[in-house]
Image (spheres, rainbow, N blue to C red):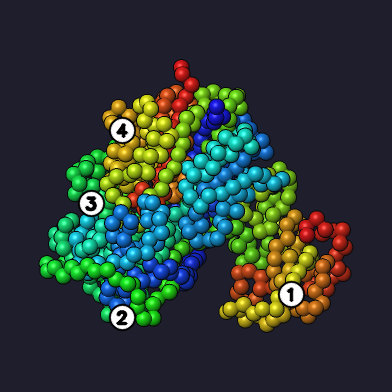
Amino acid sequence: MMREIAVIAFAQSDTLRSTAEVSEVEMLMPVLHDVVAQTGLKTADIGFTCSGSCDYLAGRAFSFTLALDGVGAWPPISESHVEMDGAWALYEAWTKLLSGDADTALVYAYGKSSPGSLRDVLTRQLDPYYVAPLWPDSVALAALQAQALIDAGDTDEPELATIGARSRATDNPRAQLKGPVPQGDYLVRPLRTGDCPPIGDGAAAVVLAAGERARELCERPAWIRGIDHRIEAHSLGVRDLTDSPSTRLAAERAGAFERPVDTAELHAPFTSQEVVLRKALRLDDSTRVNPSGGALAANPMMAAGLARIGEAAARIHRGESDRALAHATSGPCLQQNLVAVLEGDPR
Amino acid sequence: MPEVLKAPLVVEFPFTRSLGPVQSAFLTGLRERVVLGVSTRDGRTLVPPVEYDPVTAEEIRDLVHVGITGTVTTWAWNHEPRRGQPLDTPFAWVLVKLDGADTALLHALDAPGPDAVRTGMRVRIRWAEERCGAITDIACFEPYDGDDSAVTVHAGEFEDPVHGIVAQARLDYTYSPGRAQAAYINALAEHRAVGERCPACRKVYVPPRGACPTCGVATSEQVEVGPAGTVTTFCIVNIKAKNLDIEVPYVYAHIALDGADLALHGRIGGIPYDQVRMGLRVEPVWTEGGRFPDHFRPTGEPDAQYETYKELL
Ligand SMILES: [Zn+2]
C-alpha cells in the first residue's frame, strides 16, 4: 500500500502586472510564511523543500538560489529545484514523501514576467534548430492551435469568448483580471486579447504531508489519489494540435476517469486550450471548471500550474469539493501536462 | 514609496550547436534548395526530420527528398511582426505539410491579408537569396497554385555539409533590484553603506537582499555600516577581463565593513598588489559622480586582529 500524501495548505500572492518595487525573494517570502503558518509548522520542521522557477524570466542565471533565502536554508536543508512550473516541483516532492524520506514538504514557485518581454522569452524554450530561429511567440503558437480547433469544428470564436468571460467572472481576490473584460482585438488571429492570459508576476506555495501527519496538521487534507505527467513530441508539426493525448494518458494514470470529479482546475492559458483539455479529460457540464478563474484570470509563469493544484486542494480543505482534478501545463500548445486527482475524506 | 530603480539588462548569446547526420543533411539541403525528410520504419516521412522516431524512439536515418510545395494544415494571422520573425510585414504563421511529407513544418507565409489564407491552401517555398544552412534559408512560403512535387530517395550527401548552427538569442529586460537592494544602491550614491539587520538572529547583511537566508525572514531594520572595513580574504587577478580597463594584476577582496556580519567584495587599490593582506583596513573610494565605490584603499590604520574578523571569513 502506497503512503497517503495530501496537500495540507496553499497560499499565493496577488498576481500583478509589475512588481518592480520588490525582488523575487521579497515577493515570495510572505507567501512562504503564509503557507507554513497555516500548518502550524516552523520552516525548520519541513522535511523537504522543492521549488519551480525559470531563469529566463529574470534574465539571470541561478536566480532560484536567491529565492532560497526566503526559506531559511541554514542549517543545510534537503532541497531541490525544477526549471519548470512548480506543479512539477510538487511531483518531485510527492515522490520524496512516497519514498519515506520525509513526512512533510514545502513546494513553492514564483515568476516575474514583468522584467522581460514574455512572448519573446518563451521562444527560447523552442527547438533551437528549426523553430527558435524564427522567433514564433507563445501567442502565435497558441493561435495555430486555435485555428486547428476551429477548422476541426471543435470550437468557434464566440465559444472562446464565452470561456474567457466565464473564467474572469471569478471572485478570486488574487486574480489579476476579474469581471467583464473586453474580448479585444486580434493579438494573433484567431486569438484576441481576451483569449490570452494576462502577463503577471506572482508566487504560490503548498505544503504536503504524509499519512497521519497530514491529519494532525490539517482538518480536511486534500489527498493526492493519483498524479502523473506526460510529454508530447517537441515538433508541433508532428502533433495533432486539436487533441492532448499526454493529458489523457496522465489523467488515466492518475485515476481521473475512475469516478467523476466535481471540480477541475485546468491550466489553460488560452481559451482554446480549455477546449482541448475538456475533450481530453472528458469533462462535461457536471464538473465545475476553474472556479478560481484559472490562467485566464491570472497566469504567473511557473506558479500558475502549482496554483491549480493549490486551488483544487483549498476547495477540498474548505469542504467545497470532495473530488477535484488539477492540471498543469508547460511548453507551447500544451506540450507537457500534469494531472493530479485530489480527494477529501468522506463527510 | 521611494523611486523604483530600473536599468536595461540585455542577455545575448550566440549558442553554437552541432548537428547530427540528419539535421546536417536537412539544413545543408536547404542551402542547396532541396528539402529532405526522414522515413520512419512504418513508412511516415517526417519533415523537418529528426534522428529518432518521436513515437518509437527508434533511430532513423533514411532521407527522402520531398517537394518544395505543400499544403497549409493550420495558420494564424500575425498582423504585428516581432523582432527576429521571418517577415517584417504582416504575415501568417503556417504549419505546412510539404508534398511527400506526413508531418508539418512551421514557417511564415507571405500573403496580402488574412482573407487570402485558409487551411488547405497550396503554398511553395520562397528561398532566401543568401543561404547558409539554416531554417531561415527558407525566407517564407508564398501562395502557389501549380504542382511541382517531386519525391525521390536522396542520399543526403552534399559537398561541404553544414555541421553546426549558431543559434543567436537576445532578450531585453528591465532590471529592478527590489526594495532592499534599491535602498543599498541609493545609499551608495550618497557615499553611505547601509545593511539590514535580521530581527531573529540580529545579523547585519551587507548588501541586503531583503531576507535573512539563515532565518528565512524579512530583514527590515536598516543599519548604517562602514565606511571602513577589513580585508578578510583576497585573490590576485591576473587575467584581464574584456572591456575592463583595470591593469592586471590587481586584488579582489572580501571586505567586512565595520558593523556588518557579512563580507562584501571589492577591488583593492592604492597599494601594490603583493602587499595586500588579511586584516588590512580599507575604505571606499568614489570617483567623480560615481554611484558606487570604484575601489577600496588602505586607511593607514594598524591591521585588524584576526580574532575580530575570523567569523566573517
Ligand atoms: Zn537571521
Label 1 sits on a secondary structure element that is strand
* Residue identifier under label 4: A283
- In percent of width and height, residue B275 lies at 82, 77
Q: CA distance from mark 4 to mark 3?
A: 22 Å
Q: Residue at x 78, y 60 (%)?
A: B313
Q: Identify which amino acid the numbered label 4 is placed on.
A: Leu
Distance between the Cα atoms at labels 3 and 2? 33 Å
Give the amino acid at mark 1.
Ile
- In this rendering, which labeled residue sits more in front, label 1 or label 3? 3
Mark found first going from the N terminus, 2 or 1: 2
Residue identifier under label 3 = A147
Residue at which label 2 appears: B130
Q: Position of residue A335 (x, y in %)?
A: 38, 50
**Subunit ID for the residue under disc 2:** B
Cα distance, mark 1 to mark 4?
65 Å
Going from N to C along the chain, the mark reached first, 4 or 3, is: 3
Q: Which mark is residue B236?
A: 1
Tell me if label 4 and label 3 are in contact, CB under 8 Å: no
Res B61 quadrant in image: bottom left
Chain of the residue under label 1: B
Left or right of A226: which side holds B48?
Answer: left
Looking at the rendered structure, whether the residues under marks 2 and 4 are on a common chain is answered as no
Give the SS element for disc 2.
loop
Number of the front mark, 1 or 4: 4
Are there few (<14), some (14-19), or many (20+) residues within 10 Å of tag 2?
Answer: few
| B210, above or below B169, in the image | above
